Amino acid sequence: MKIQIERTQNPRPKKNSSELGFGQFFSDHMFVSEYDSKQGWHSARIIPYQNLSIDPAASVLHYGQALFEGMKAFYQTNGEMVLFRPEFNAERFREGAKRLCMEAPPVEDFIQAVAELVRVDHDWIPSEKGCSLYIRPTLIGHEGFLGVRPSNKYMFYVILSPVGAYYKEGQKPIKIWVEEQDLRAAPGGLGAVKAGANYAASLQAALKAKQKGYAQVLWLDSEREFVEEVGTMNVFFVFKNEIVTPELSGTILPGGTRQCALQLLKDWKLPIVERKIKISEVIAALEKGELLEAFGTGTAAIISPIGELNYKNKNYDVSNQKTGPLADRLYKEITGIQYGEIPDRHHWIKKISV
Ligand SMILES: Cc1ncc(COP(=O)(O)O)c(C=O)c1O
């Protein structure tokens, strides 16, 4: 793919890593390419970060034809600039596009777009450990029409945001509200893909949880019986005799960090299983002192220990509100590989030359 590059004349001021937070600031440039049925994907370009101009009747604005990805670039300890598992995100993007009847760029073009944009804005990658450049590839249907059918025009764009730690609490365990009213995803719906619509469905419960003092919600299935995900993360429970993560049921996002955690737990010969887990099983284990740890996995926070669960208005402490040893070990191993301090045995790292 040929990419035209127009560099900004007005570079933005950069922030100190302590001010970054998550997704508040954006780099100087963005990647954009467009698709229509006659020309296919065309006009690939890197341009100064700017507003989009789309038809007010664009399908994304009315019927939610929108899909995104979340991935990261790092400076490793030896100064090498790298991406973490870009093929995984490119392939998940194509799967998501298929479900939403959208056209997605080929895997090689997705990776080239991301790598080239990161190269152009490499001085936006924060160098402190714990910080990274978050990458947000996005696909929208932007044909202007008001019939309900898939758009014939798509825009693929990528923006970059330097980020610090995801939670204000840092790696400290988070408080979780078990949500029994709202549903993130239903069987046959969009739960297994990163459709913007899933996040719209999740806002009300997340807001309610926040107002009650909880950082995220634990989502249950449509019968409110089985555990699905925690906020925007997959969830793992460390029981006395086994480690369990919900099996991919079609309503759960197949997370990249989940896949890494499964691989590492298998490498360490620990008893990890993917199966259905009832919320009643989690609560019974908590009551018997047999739930040793629980944590979420996701690109933004990597591993997020759970310190407290509220179910039916009763609070349960998890791991005495401390980060458990397995959450800590997984966090250190994954970030160690990302920052080049631990050998990349599974080829998760892709180097980008300056
Ligand atoms: C709903 C949801 N579940 C799980 C995850 C974790 O996926 P990944 O590990 O690929 O970031 C995410 C994204 O971060 C998400 O939005």
Image (cartoon, rainbow, N blue to C red):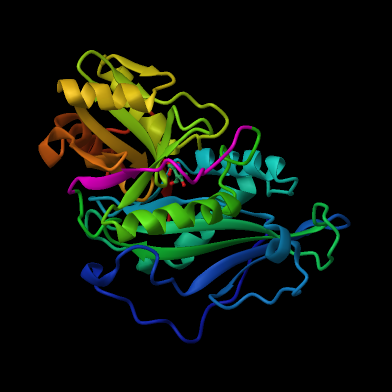
Query: Which quarter of the rendering shows the C terminus?
Result: bottom left
- Vertical side of 4 occupied by 138: above or below: above
Q: Residue at x 24, y 47 (%)?
A: 175
Residue 34: percent from the left, percent from the top?
Answer: 73, 62
Give the camera-side residue of 168 and 108.
Answer: 168
Residue 322: in sight, yes or no? no
Q: Main secondary structure of the magenta part?
A: loop
Give the camera-side residue of 302 and 91.
Answer: 302
Query: Which residue is the extreme one toward the right?
Result: 38
Q: Residue at x 27, y 33 (%)?
A: 343
Q: Residue at x 55, y 34 (%)?
A: 251
Q: Quadrant of ligand 1?
A: top left
- Vertical side of 313 occupied by 170: above or below: below
Residue 276 lies left or right of residue 336; in this view the side is right
Q: Quadrant of residue 288?
A: top left
Give the camera-side residue of 37 and 174.
Answer: 174
Query: Which quarter of the rendering shows the N terminus?
Result: bottom right
Residue 225 lies left or right of residue 42; in this view the side is left
Residue 95 lies left or right of residue 255; in this view the side is right
Magenta segment includes 179 = yes
Magenta part of the chain? 172-187
- Vertical side of 27 occupied by 212: above or below: above
Magenta segment includes 154 = no
